[in-house]
Image (spheres, rainbow, N blue to C red):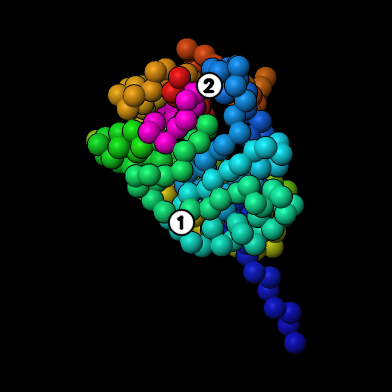
Amino acid sequence: MPSKPKTFDKYAYYLKAVQTPADDVEFFDLVFKDSFPKKKPTLFREDFCGTFALACEWAKLRKENKAIGIDLDPEPLDYGKVHNLSALSADQQKRVQLVKGDVLSRGLPKADIIAALNFSFYIFKERKQMLSYFRNCYDSLKRPGIFLIDCFGGSSTLDVNEDRTDHGEFVYYWEQAKFNPVTFHSQFYIHFRLPGEKKREKVFSYDWRLWTLPELQDLLLEAGFAKVHVYWEGTTRKGEGDGIFRRTEAGDDAEGWIAYLAAEKP
C-alpha cells in the first residue's frame, strides 16, 4: 500500500523563505533607540500578523515585553497558536495577545511599536483608505512611539517578472503576474517547488497597489507623524541585498530594492 503523501505546510515554507522574526525584532529595538534613546519599548503590536511569528519573538526578546497580533483571517491565527505560540514558555505565552479583527477598526490596543510587514498594507489601494489606516496607527501609538512598515520597488516592479530563489530543500518563486501603469495595481503570487515534485502554483496570492516612498512618507506626515525616516538596505559586492538597513536620505537606483519607513510619534 503506497504511503500517504505528507501535507504541504505552506506557512512553514513561507516562514523559511520570507521571514526572519528574530532579526526583525532586534531591528525594531534599534530603530526605536535611534529615535528615542532614553526609553526602552516593551509593548509591540503586529498588524496583519498572520501566524504572528514577530509577536512571539518580541515576547521572547525580554521578560518584560508584551505583544499583540491583529489579523482578520482565522486560519493563520489558528496555525500560529499551534506552531508558534505553543513553542513559547508559559510566561511568554501570557504576554502575547491575539485579536481577530480589522486594523481599520477604532479602539485597537495601544503599543510602543506598531509594525505592518511583508508589504501587507499594500492591500489598501485608495489614498483615503491608506490615510485612514495610518491615522489609526498614529492614534494607537503611545508617546513616544514608532510605526514601522516595509516597502519595495525599483524598475523591475514596473513590469511582469518572476524571481527564483533556491533554498536547497525547496525553491521559492516570487511572481509579479500583472502590472497596471495607470493605477500601479499589481498581482503577485508565491510558488514553491519541492525536490521531485511539480511546482506548486499560487500558494499565496496578493492583489496590491505599489506605493512609492514619497507617497507613503507624505501620507504618514499627513496622518500626524512628526518625522519619517527611511532605512535602506545595503548591498554585497555582487550587488545583492545584504539584509542590513541603515537610516539614510538617499537610496540606490536599483532594479529592485527593499526599505523600511519609521514614523515617529514623539
Q: Tell me whether the residue at label 1 lies in contact with that at label 2, contact meaning CB atoms closer than 8 angstroms.
A: no
What residue would you read off at disc 1? 100
Question: In terms of depth relative to the viewer, which is nearer, 124 or 238?
Answer: 124
Measured along the vertical axis of the image, is residue 190 above or below residue 144?
A: below
Q: Amino acid at mark 1?
A: Lys
Measured along the vertical axis of the image, is residue 45 above or below residue 41?
A: below
Magenta span includes 231:
no
Sequence order check, earlier mark of 1 and 2: 1
Magenta span includes 139:
yes
Residue 129 in which image quadrant: top left
How far apart are labels 1 and 2 at the CA level?
30 Å
Q: State which quarter of the image contains the N terminus.
A: bottom right
Side of 181 relative to 143 (left or right): left
Q: Residues within 10 Å of mark 2 (few under 14, many from 20)?
A: many
Q: Residue 13 location in percent, x, y? A: 63, 53
What residue would you read off at disc 2? 231
Residue drawn 59% across the image and 29% down it: 41
Residue drawn 70% across the image and 78% down it: 4
| Image: magenta residue range | 138-155
